[in-house]
Image (cartoon, rainbow, N blue to C red):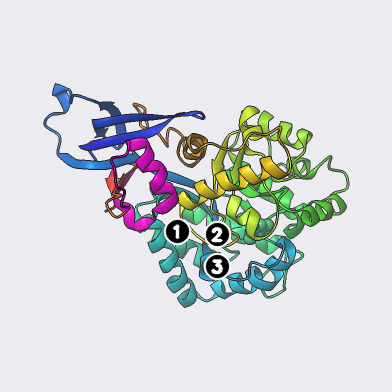
Amino acid sequence: MDFVWKGHIIDSLDRHSLRVRENSYLVCQEGRCAGVFDVLPEQYRNLPLEDFGDRLIIPGMTDLHIHAPQFAFRGLGMDMELLDWLNTHTFPEEAKYRDLDYARRAYGQFTAHLRRSETTRACIFATVHVPATELLMEQLEASGLVTYVGKVNMNRNGPLYLIEPSTFQAVRETRQWLEETAARFDRTKPILTPRFIPSCTDDLLYRLADLRAEFGVPVQSHLSENLGEIAWVRELVPTAKHYGDAYRKFGLLGGDYPCIMAHCVHSDEAELELLRENGVFIAHSPESNMNIASGVAPVNRFLDLEIPTGLATDVAGGSHESMFRAMTHAIQASKLRWRLLDQSVAPLTFDTAFYLATRGGGAFFGQVGAFDPGYELDALVLDDGNLDHPQPLTARERLERLAYLGDERNIHGKAVAGTRLF
Ligand code: GUN
Ligand code: FE
């Protein structure tokens, strides 16, 4: 876990700017970044050094929201909105994970793709099934990625062949899963995962809040993604001031525990204020929001309010696990939003999209997503040798082109928390 990498090193300084250090040395000690230096200090000269020459070295990326079981139908069934899409495509696919042989094959493909991708950390939804969720956790642990994985809870408004048959059984199985996995892995941790308010009865949500406190685990769910969904939540929880307030009321949003809400496309000022007050992370999933016609979230507004925000692929609402694609989709969607809907929220720059993919989402995992001293060392070595260009480009221009034109074939090397994956 101690090494030195040499190359053109780029990370995010802050929301507005990249930091570029050409021909520099990145030092990893005990899995953490000891610093970036233009001349290698004496005390690191005995560490193994790999010179990547003209290649770029950037932080690994965090996918704040992705559904592992949906990977199998990525790129299919994109002509519906959320609630019909769930019933028609998603729930029938997720039901297949009752079968462990199917889960082993499908999750094996998901994990292999994620390992090869720009992602070094991820927050992942599994399905309701405990054995398949534990199998996914074993596969992810073996991959070297660092992840949170959630056994999904859903006990209403879904097909009987998938939903948990009672609150009692849902709580018993969720408890069993937490007991079995809370301390079992180094890099793979459980995260409490009520699918969304329409899928969970009030009593289940209250009981999940008790489990959350008992096991000290974080929470992930969906919030204000789709207009039909929001109207439905208003009917289901009439005493809540807004959708976010419904999670708060059941004890699943608020307090000092970590929480991620995906989407927040239609969150109003009061809901955003609740997220801000409680340090809730927003997982911005631009491709999914376009594919199932949810809308476009006002990302710079989130950042102005200092709500912690990261990027997500939301496979299979999103079609692809690539965080480069999530970055470019975020920029493109923000420009259409600005042009067509609301000129009070500026479109995203490349620097901001890179921030969201690295430092922004990485913060959910602690000191992650940049090459500051003390940060856990997640890094990608990028090779743009196949992206022909007739004249020399700056390191920054090369990174920008890699995000728009590159894919996993441009990832030459990858380290996660100081461990080399390839
Ligand atoms: N809301 C509830 N379940 C889901 C899901 O699987 N995907 C997305 N995008 N939104 C959801
Ligand atoms: Fe989702």
Residue type beneath disc 3:
Gly
Specify start and end residues of the magenta stretch as a single range: 387-416
Q: Sequence order check: which comes first, mark 2 or mark 1?
A: 1
Taking the view exactly as shown, the residue that stands out farthest to the left is 46
**Answer yes or no: do the residues labelled 3 and 2 have beta carbons within 8 Å?**
no
Q: Sequence order check: which comes first, mark 3 or mark 1?
A: 3
Residue 292 picture quarter: bottom right
Q: CA distance from mark 3 to mark 1?
A: 24 Å
Q: Residue at x 70, y 57 (%)?
A: 293
Q: Is residue 397 above or below residue 420?
A: above
* In front: label 3 or label 2: 3
Q: Which quadrant of the render holds ligand 2?
A: bottom right
Q: Residue at x 61, y 56 (%)?
A: 288
Q: CA distance from mark 3 to mark 2?
A: 9 Å
Q: Which residue is mark 3?
A: 75
Residue type beneath disc 2:
Val
Residue 401 on the magenta span? yes
Q: Which mark is residue 315?
A: 2
Q: Is residue 13 above or below residue 185?
A: above
Mark 2 secondary-structure assignment: loop
Residue 159 or 332: which is nearer the viewer?
Answer: 332
Q: CA distance from mark 2 to mark 1?
A: 18 Å
Mark 1 secondary-structure assignment: helix
Residue 356 on the magenta span? no
Horizontally, is 176 left or right of 340 in the view?
Answer: left
The N terminus - image quarter: top left
